[in-house]
Image (spheres, grey):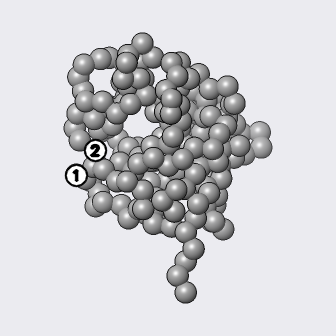
Amino acid sequence: MAKRLISRIFVHALPGRPTRGMVHVGLAAFPCALGRAGIRSAKREGDGATPRASLPLRRVFYRHDRLVKPASRQATRAIRPDDAWCDDAADRRYNRLIKRPPGSAEECLTRADHLYDVIVELGWNDHPVRRHRGSAIFWHGARDGFTATAGCVAIRREVFAKILPRLARDAVMVIR
C-alpha cells in the first residue's frame, strides 16, 4: 500500500520557549528553531518574528555542490552562486529571488555554513508583495542547539530527506 501524501505541516512554539518549537509532519514530530521574536500575527520586515499563518510551499532550493537533488513534488532548483533574496522594502524587487550584485539589502543564498543547503521557500507576502510586511520566510537547516532564526523555521538538515518526499505538491505549513 502506498503512503498517503501529507498536505499540512503544523508548527508551534514550545510552552515558555518562543524561539523553539516542533514541526509535525503526519505522525512524526521534529524539533525546530523559530524567529528570535517568536511567532507573531503582525509580521514586519526585520522584526525577527515567524509569521502566524498558513504558508504554501513554493519551491525547494538546494546546494548542488553539496547534495544531490532532493526528492520532492515541489518545484526544485539548484542554488546558483549569484542567487540572493531582496529584503530591501524600498527596492522594486522586494521579497523576490534576485541576482547579486547590486544592492546591499539582500540575503545571499550561497552560504559558507550549511543552513541553506536545502531551503523551502514559503509563500509569505508574495501575492501581492506589500512593503515592510516581511521577506524571505524560509524553512531551512538549523544551527546546532536550535538557536533562533531571523523569522524562519529551521530543522535539522538531514530531516528534509525524510519529509520532502512525503509532501503533496500543494502542501502548506501552518504556523500557530
Q: Is residue 11 left or right of residue 68?
A: right
Q: CA distance from mark 1 to mark 2?
A: 9 Å
| Mark 1 Cα-neighbour bin, 10 Å: few <14, some 14–19, many ≥20 | few
**Who comes first in sequence, dot 1 or dot 2?**
1
Residue 37: numbered disc: none
Image position of 72 with respect to 75: above or below: below
Q: Which residue is mark 2?
A: 79
Could you tell me residue 63's position as x and y percent?
Answer: 29, 49
Residue 104 or residue 2, whichever sits in front: 2
What amino acid is labelled 2 in the image? Ile
The quarter of the displayed image where residue 7 is located? bottom right
Kindly indicate whether the residue at mark 2 contacts the one at mark 1 (C-beta within 8 angstroms): no
Residue in the image at 29% along x and 17% along y: 103
Q: Secondary structure at mark 2?
A: loop
> Farthest right residue?
15
Could you tell me residue 135's position as x and y percent?
Answer: 48, 28
Q: Nearer the viewer, mark 1 or mark 2?
A: 2
> Farthest top residue?
90
Image position of 99 with respect to 145: above or below: above
The quarter of the displayed image where residue 14 is located? top right
Q: Is residue 38 left or right of residue 162?
A: right
Image position of 71 with respect to 94: above or below: below
Image position of 27 with respect to 47: above or below: below
Residue 68 or residue 98, whichever sits in front: 98
What amino acid is labelled 1 in the image? Asp
Q: Secondary structure at mark 1?
A: loop
Q: Which residue is mark 1?
A: 65
Asked if one can make out residue 102 in the rendered structure from this viewpoint, the answer is: yes
